[in-house]
Image (cartoon, rainbow, N blue to C red):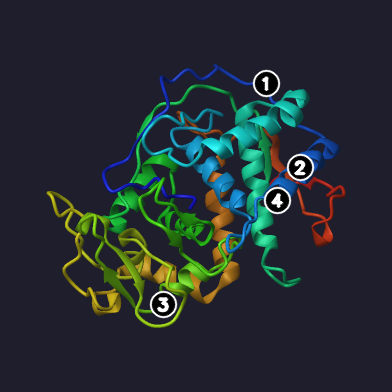
Amino acid sequence: STFTTMRATHAVIVLATLALLAGAQAVVPDTTEIDAIRCDLFARIDASTTRGNPQPLLATIVRLSFHDCVGGCDGFIDTDLHGNEGLADTIRTVNEMYDSLGAPTGMSRADFYALVGTLAVHKAADNQQSPTAPMPTIPLFFGRADGEGRIVDLPNPHNGIEEVTTVMADMFGFTEREAVAIMGAHTLGRAHRGASGFNGPWTSRPHTLDNDYFSELTEPWRVVESPRGPFRSFWRRVTGGPRNRLMLNVDIALTNVISPTTTGDRAGEVTACRDDHQDCPIQGSVATIATDFANDNAAFIAAFATAFTTMITRGPNGPLAGTLEPAGGLAYTLPANDECAPGPPGPGPGG
């Protein structure tokens, strides 16, 4: 999943020492260059499909964008460090693309990571395969500086939602609504034992960006004890749905106050509403937002696009607004039927 690095213990992303360039010269690629990158990216995503696992590269590229922007988007992710498990192959693939298609344009690696992440989000939304399905509006910006990262703590997936909203506000300046929306990235991909210690998808269509994740949370879920201990426990649907679908404490806490233990040997253990999370109290304003997204796919897509845009325009010292080009962003629309043909850019919001 995009956020499988939310670990059982407070994950620490160590991206070496902060060494961002003082200022990057913005290089805005032309339509032909963007189309070449899109065509190569989408071909690789389609080719990654295996039986029972459609387009897994799509979700990990979105996850890559998140990890690159933790602490400020800078085109650097240390794959040897705890929290970045499972990203090495994806980074290798994207770096190969950058060397052949991105670097020749003059754009920074940080810009390329943001670009492929944005294109992957568009493809995931296009996988709704409906002419009336809502599509995200995420302008393309250029001018991020390449660097070597910094140390950042991520939320623990076994705790409640308060930690997520607080950390996301500090990390990206997210509003509560944006923090809930970005959690909707769990609709993409799946948990992997090698990365998070868990295995299975959150939704039935892990290559599609829609509100299925929030719709799933309207169903009753129960605790499943892990042989690895209570801190490895997770949640399964009480009735219906594929047996391998799962939720973690942080997911369930979007709608209900499950009050997991946060310290000691039994950290992550839930003692209340273990047979049905809906027996626990409603989670206040966060639950209201999650319910809104469950009932309105267009509202979720719009909020996710806003949060994603905020995330990929964040530098180590705060928002990069006013320093990226073009002003207002470059609007880019996928060609009809996902054809490998030019999608004409135009002025973005405010452009």
Which marked residue is nearer to the observer: mark 2 or mark 1?
2
Q: Residue at x 76, y 39 (%)?
A: 37
User: Residue 346's spot in the image, x, y percent?
Assistant: 80, 46
Amino acid type assigned to the residue bearing label 2 in the image: Asp
User: Looking at the image, is mark 2 or mark 3 earlier in the sequence?
Assistant: 2
Residue 326 on image: x %, y %? 72, 35
Answer with mark 1 or mark 3, whichever residue precedes in sequence: 1
Q: Amino acid at mark 4?
A: Ala
The residues bearing labels 3 and 4 have C-alpha atoms spaced at a distance of 34 Å
Say if residue 259 shows up in the picture.
Answer: yes
Residue where numbered disc 1 is placed: 25
The percent position of residue 237, horizontal first and vertical second, equals 38, 76
Give the Cα distance between marks 2 and 3: 38 Å
Q: Is residue 63 placed above or below 257 in the rendered structure?
A: above
- Give how far apart the Cα atoms at labels 2 and 4 are: 11 Å
- At 51% across and 62% down in the image, what residue appears? 187
